[in-house]
Image (cartoon, helix red, strand yellow):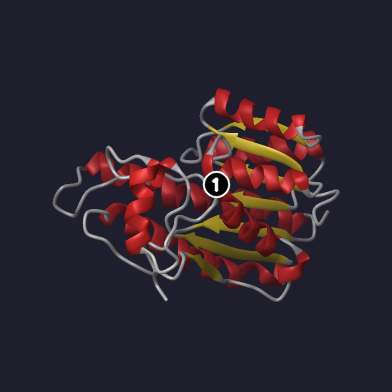
Amino acid sequence: MRFSDKVVLVTGGGGGIGRATALAFAAEGATVSVAGRAAEPLAQTVKLIETAGGAASAVIADVTREDEVAAMVETVVRRHDGLHVAFNNAGVFVPGGVVDLSVPEWTRAIDVNLTGVWLSMKHEIAHMRARGGGAIVNNASTLGAHGRRPGTSAYVATKAAVSALTRNAALEHIADGIRINAISPGPADTAMSLLPGETPADRATRLRAALPIGRVGTLAEIASAVLWLASPESGFTVGHDLVLDGGATA
């Protein structure tokens, strides 16, 4: 129960890595607040946590809007009397190479993947600094600082920027008692890792040849890395980008 008496915020908590991580935090004693733009997926996450005996709440917020991000953090603090851990997970995959991307597509990738992480950290840090510290984990990707792939230019650019932003923010705020790190997952068991028209079975066949480990990463494996970075066990880990890719970039 590493997170007993801790309040945890997970953006993009309505499914995938966000939901799995929210459930993992709650299973270890945290009060978890999940945030996102759609009410129903968040409500499902809250129900799953409560059914398992945990404590959770939901906050509707668009991480690209500063007023909504500020309200998100304020709501969590007001409801639960604090904020100790944040997992900035909200993100979007926008396909397309440099010459194929439209300005709206490029802007969407920047707004959600990069500006959303910056705004979330800005308001989370402001609260944590006033309350004596905390831990923040950002979701980057192996596509970015660690690897590239044709046809993913906007995604690669934004996720590389998340990695760099994480490291710089870590240096800026470790003296405030706030540890900031990132994870960079490779293909995980989410819809985002499926190619257009691909089934999970097709993906399994493709990844057996494409990844040294020969399989997709499980959501439990990704969540466990987030929990470790957020826990006292990683107390000497600052500004790290933890790659979780089955050996793809080894």
Please state the horizontal and vertical placement of residue 168, each as a whole percent of the image.
52, 70
Q: Is residue 35 left or right of residue 185?
A: right
* 151 shown above or below 70: below
- For this rendering, which residue is in front, 34 or 17? 17
Which residue is situated farthest in the right direction here?
Answer: 5
Q: Is residue 200 left or right of residue 41?
A: left
Q: How many marks?
A: 1
* 203 shown above or below 247: above
Please state the horizontal and vertical placement of residue 137, each as a whole percent of the image.
60, 58
Residue at (79, 45) in percent of width and height: 82
Quadrant of the rendered image containing residue 35: top right
* 122 shown above or below 48: below
User: Judging from the image, what secondary structure is the residue with disc 1 in?
Assistant: helix
Please state the horizontal and vertical placement of residue 141, each as a whole percent of the image.
44, 59
Which residue is situated farthest in the left direction here?
Answer: 99
Q: Is residue 182 left or right of residue 157?
A: right
Quadrant of the rendered image containing residue 2: bottom right
- For this rendering, which residue is in front, 146 or 246? 246
Quarter of the image for the C terminus: give it: bottom left
Residue at (59, 57) in percent of width and height: 221
Q: Which residue is mark 1?
A: 17
- For this rendering, which residue is in front, 157 or 46? 46
Mark 1 residue type: Ile
